[in-house]
Amino acid sequence: MLPASTVMNDAVIGVFDSGVGGLSVLREVRKALPAENLLYVADSGFAPYGDRPAQYIQDRTEAIVGYFAGAGAKAAVIACNTATAVAVHALRARFSFPIVAIEPAVKPAVEITRSGIIGILATKQTLASDNFSRLVEKYGHNVRVLAQPCPGLVEQVEKGELDGPSTRPLVTRYVAPLIAQGADTLVLGCTHFPFLRATITDVAGTGVFILDPAIAVARELHRRLKACDLLSSDERPGTDQFRTSGEPETVQPVFRKLWAANIEVRPLP
Ligand code: DGL
C-alpha cells in the first residue's frame, strides 16, 4: 500500500475560469509543473462573469471549487481575475487546500513603466472590486493608472476569434486611447486577453510593455505545493483533463485551437 502522502501528491490540481481564458494560465502551470495531474474547468454554461453580480460569481466559484474538493484535489488555481476579485476570500475561508489566485499585475507594471502611466485591461467587475482598489492604493501612488473595461473581448476569445473584422476594432477601441494618453505599459488583467496578445501588440505599437502574470501564478503554485510537501513525486508526465459546464461540442473546437492539441472536453458532472 502507498503511504498517504504519495496518494495525496498524485491528486489533481483544479484550475478554473469562466471559460477558455484560464488556458493561458494552465499552459504556464503545465510548463512549470510537468508531473502534476491537472483538471481544468471552464464554466462556459455561466460565462462571461465580467458583468454579473458579485453573488452570482461567488455561487459559481464555490460550486466549482466544491467540485474540485469532491474530486480529491490537493490545490486549486483561480485562473480568472474576475473570480479572484469577487470570491477569493470566501473560497479561502471555505476550503482548506491551497488556493492560488491571479490578479492584475499592477505592481510589476509600476516597476516597469517609464512614462509613469499604466493601462489595465480587465472586466468591469474586476475594475470595480475592492481588491482592485486596494492593489492601486498599495502600489499605484506614483503613477497614473488608466483602468479600461473591455466589454465584448471575452466573448470574442470564447468564439476563437483572436483577430479579424469583429475583434480588431474592439481591441483598437480599448487600447488606442490608453496609448494616446501616454501609457507605455499595459496589464492583461483578464486571462482571456493573452490570446489576443498579437492583436494588442499590433494596436499598441512597439515599445509598449505588455504584462501577463500567468508565469508568476505558476511559480507561486510551485512554491505553495513545495512548502506544503504536495509536489508530485511521479517521474512520468502528468495528465490534463478538461471539463465544461457548457456544451462540450460547442466549446471543444476553441479549446483545441487555444491548447493546440486534439484534446477532449467532457461535461462537468
Ligand atoms: N478570464 C476572466 C478574467 O480573467 C474573464 C471574466 C469573464 O468571464 O468575463 O477576468
Image (spheres, grey):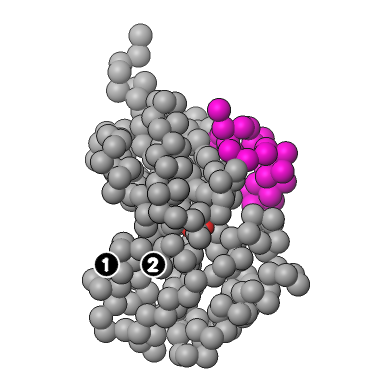
Where does the image place residue 227, in percent across and percent down from the top left? 24, 40
Density class for disc 1 (Cα within 10 Å; few <14, some 14-19, many ≥20) is few
Determine which residue is flagged by label 1.
134
> Residue 41 location in percent, x, y?
53, 40
Residue found farthest to the top = 1
Asked if residue 123 is positioned above or below residue 246 in the image, the reply reads below
Q: Residues within 10 Å of mark 2 (few under 14, many from 20)?
A: some
Residue 138 picture quarter: bottom left
Sequence-wise first label, 1 or 2: 2
- Residue type pointed to by label 1: Arg
Residue drawn at (63%, 40%) of the image = 246
**Magenta-span inclusion, residue 268:** yes
Label 1, secondary structure: give it.
helix
Residue 56 in percent (x, y) is at 45, 48
Helix, strand or loop at mark 2: helix
The residue stretch that appears in magenta: 240-269
Q: Is residue 32 above or below residue 190?
A: above
Look at the picture and state if 99 lies above or below 116: above
Answer above or below: position of 71 versus 249: above
Query: Identity of the amino acid at label 2?
Result: Ala
Residue at position x 45%, y 37% from top? 64
Residue pictured at 60% horizontal, 43% vertical: 45
Q: Name the image quarter holding the N terminus.
A: top left
The CA distance from mark 1 to mark 2 is 11 Å
